Image (spheres, helix red, strand yellow):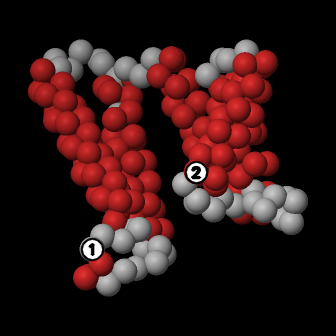
Amino acid sequence: MVEIFSGIVFIIFGGLIFFFSRGFRQFTVEQGMGPDSMPKLYAVFMIALAVMLILSALIKIIKNKNTQNNSGSDGVIGKLSAETIERLKISGVTIVAFFIYLFMLRPLGFLIATPPLVFFVMKIMLAKTRNAIMVAILLTAVIFVIFRTLLGVPLPIGIPLRGIIW
């Protein structure tokens, strides 16, 4: 059941990646692959792997039903442990936090929106507060320097830092 849920989430996520990558500037055919090519390729692979995950889970469920002797078992849902349910809750909270981050990225900017997300995810993974703060700040700074300075990729600056950071 968890595999089916994960597969559905990955199909939706892959579809969103494919859909939003259409907004990248297109090149003509003579220029070869454009900036939308890699995200679309990843999205197609993600969707294909998610379909395979769902199919393998369905095959496993069918095999289990064929071998089950109807002795009052609760089926697949009854077999979910408390640990699995807790992991699903944590995954759901993380996904919600990521979507909140996506909506806050443009108005707040990369430098302000990213550290709270990294800190939150680290705390969910039971990291110490001091370590989570250090990793959040350092990871944000390193990513910013690599993308903005070395690769020349513009990252959202946001309204609070507009005019302060080039």
- At a point 75% along the width and 48% down the height, the residue shown is 111
Q: Locate residue 116 relative to residue 14 in the image: left or right.
A: right
- At a point 70% along the width and 57% down the height, the residue shown is 105
- The x, y position of residue 154, in whole percent, is 63, 62
The residue at which mark 2 appears reads as: 150
Whether label 2 touches label 1, CB < 8 Å: no
* Vertical order, 117 against 132 (above or below): below
Q: Give the camera-side residue of 28 and 55.
A: 28
The amino acid at mark 1 is: Gly
Q: Give the camera-side residue of 130 and 148.
A: 148
- The x, y position of residue 67, in whole percent, is 12, 21
Q: Quarter holding the N terminus?
A: top left
* Quadrant in which residue 19 is drawn: bottom left
Mark 1: few/some/many CA within 10 Å (<14, 14-19, 20+)? few
- At a point 38% along the width and 28% down the height, the residue shown is 77
Q: Secondary structure at mark 1?
A: loop
The residue at which mark 1 appears reads as: 32
* Quadrant in which residue 153 is drawn: bottom right
Q: Locate residue 65 relative to residue 90 in the image: left or right.
A: left
Residue 96 seen: no
- Callout in the foreground (2, 1): 2
Mark 2: few/some/many CA within 10 Å (<14, 14-19, 20+)? few
The Cα atoms of the two marked residues, 2 and 1, are separated by 25 Å
* Residue at the farthest front position: 150
Q: Give the camera-side residue of 61 and 13.
A: 13
